[in-house]
Image: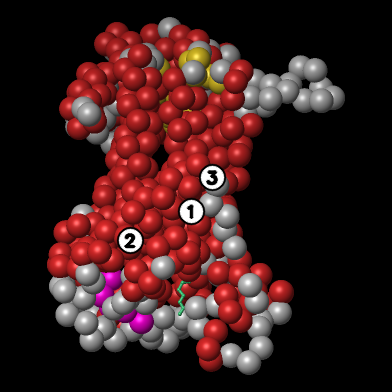
Amino acid sequence: MSDAANKAWSGRFNEPVSELVKRYTASVTFDKRMAEVDIQGSLAHAAMLNKSGVLSDDDLAAIRGGMADILADIRAGTLEWSIDLEDVHMNVERRLTDKIGDAGKRLHTGRSRNDQVATDIRLYLRGATDAIVGLVHELQRSLVDLAEQHAATVMPGFTHLQVAQPVTFGHHMLAYVEMLGRDAERFIDARKRINRLPLGSAALAGTTYPIDREYTAQLLGFDSVTQNSLDAVSDRDFAIEFTAAAALTMTHLSRLSEELIIWMSPRFGFIDIADRFCTGSSIMPQKKNPDVPELVRGKTGRVNGHLVALLTLMKSQPLAYNKDNQEDKEPLFDTVDTLSDTLRIYADMMRGITVKPEAMERAVKQGFATATDLADYLVKKGLPFRDAHEAVALAVRYAEEKRRDLSELQLVELQSFSPLIDADVVNVLTPEGSLAARDHVGGTAPNQVRAQIARWRGLLAA
Ligand code: ARG
């Protein structure tokens, strides 16, 4: 078939595009991923045309039969995609016409590829969003399980990556459960704006046929129909929102990744990651590298890049549809793939983590993590906070010279820094005492951590 004869608009043109231009303008190599939702959208459109009296019963039956065959071919991987037919929409339509003749040519009545592609992306993204919310919840469950095992495991909490105050490892894990909870909320919220039907907007202005958009929406499970045709065929803000939610999720996971990498370094030795998530070195036999968290850190850059790509794609586009929008798909698909894989691997990886409580406890003591508790103790005995801060600073300096933790100093030694110190000080100087004292909603006391675990279990119950 000659190129001119092949194209959907062949009548208008005197010469075919060059091979390079054909390749440059085609999208089928990547938008074929939307084939199933494209067929789903076409079937709903055909049913609506039939209900509205635009398409005969015979034509509808033929379209249904032809599409069923095409779907089977796609699933079997036997459908041959042609870049001569530019995109997934025209490939499917041509196959249909090859199979069923004129009925296939009537499918595109009252529709344009502009509202068709906008519909397909929304259908695709709705499915992806639901799957991703499920994966985020799965990772949260894995973190909650880990938190439960370590609701009372002492570890140093850090600020500026310097030992600050004792926290529990469970509390630390639950911080990520919170972040992921907001991430899931963002996806669920974006879904509301994804799930609106643009079909019926046609090329840009609507159509002259007596269409029933509400009916199409109902068939496809959309919550509502878009209210302005120019807006509906052109804006991709819903895809940008989705990608922003994905970028934030990856950003949260990059923070956890950085921590896992640091904790697994022998300098810290707080955790070990199961071998199946690590690799060795081809030259250094002793090495075990945390490749997965490192890659998650790296892939976060990639997803953040997709967000910027989509924002830049949309920026300054005049109404309505422009071919620029064809460039939305690769960043979007790669965002879905990268985030889905990352979430799946992470849920498994967190279940395979070995926690080393002795190393964490040692770091708490070396870091004088209970110094604030001692200052608070003195304040409660009547000393102004600044004076208490100074007294404890001197005590820390002394303990450091003696290579002991504050909890390992004799009472008389402590009293040389403040006469307000009594025998009851022992309760505040141990990490356990420090943890138990932070007993309020959001605090690190083990009973508070357990209460949060129970709360999350309720929220995540499938
Ligand atoms: N492949 C195109 C896209 O992804 C489909 C819409 C094309 N419409 C047009 N008038 N060229 O956006």
Residue 392 magenta: no
Q: Residue at x 34, y 48 (%)?
A: 127
Res. 426 image quadrant: top left
251 relative to 1 in the view: left or right: left
Q: Which residue is mark 2?
A: 63
Dot placed on the residue nearer the N-terminal end, 3 or 1:
1
Colour logic = secondary structure
Q: Amino acid at mark 2?
A: Ile
Residue 427 vs residue 6, the one in the foreground: 6
Percent x, y of residue 108: 35, 74
What range of the chain is rendered magenta? 199-203
> Label 1: few (<14), some or many (≥20) within 10 Å?
some
Q: Secondary structure at mark 3?
A: loop
Q: Which residue is mark 1?
A: 33
Q: Give residue 38's position: percent from left, percent from top.
A: 38, 59
Within the magenta stretch, is there residue 202? yes
Please name which of the two marks, 2 or 1, marks the residue nearer to the observer. 2
Query: For the residue carrying disc 2, how many other residues have a C-alpha within 10 Å: few (<14), some (14-19), or many (20+)?
Result: many
- Residue 77, numbered label: 3
Q: Secondary structure at mark 1?
A: helix
Quadrant where the image shows the C terminus? top left
- Judged by depth in the image, the label closer to the viewer, 3 or 1, is 3
Q: Nearer the viewer, residue 383 or 134?
A: 134
Classify 304 as above or below 144.
below
Q: Residue at x 37, y 25 (%)?
A: 142
**Residue 245 pos. (x, y %):** 38, 53
In front: mark 3 or mark 2?
2
Of residues 404 and 284, the one nearer the viewer is 284
Residue behind label 2 places its C-beta within 8 angstroms of ligand 1: no
Q: Looking at the image, which residue is at 16% across and 74% down? A: 53
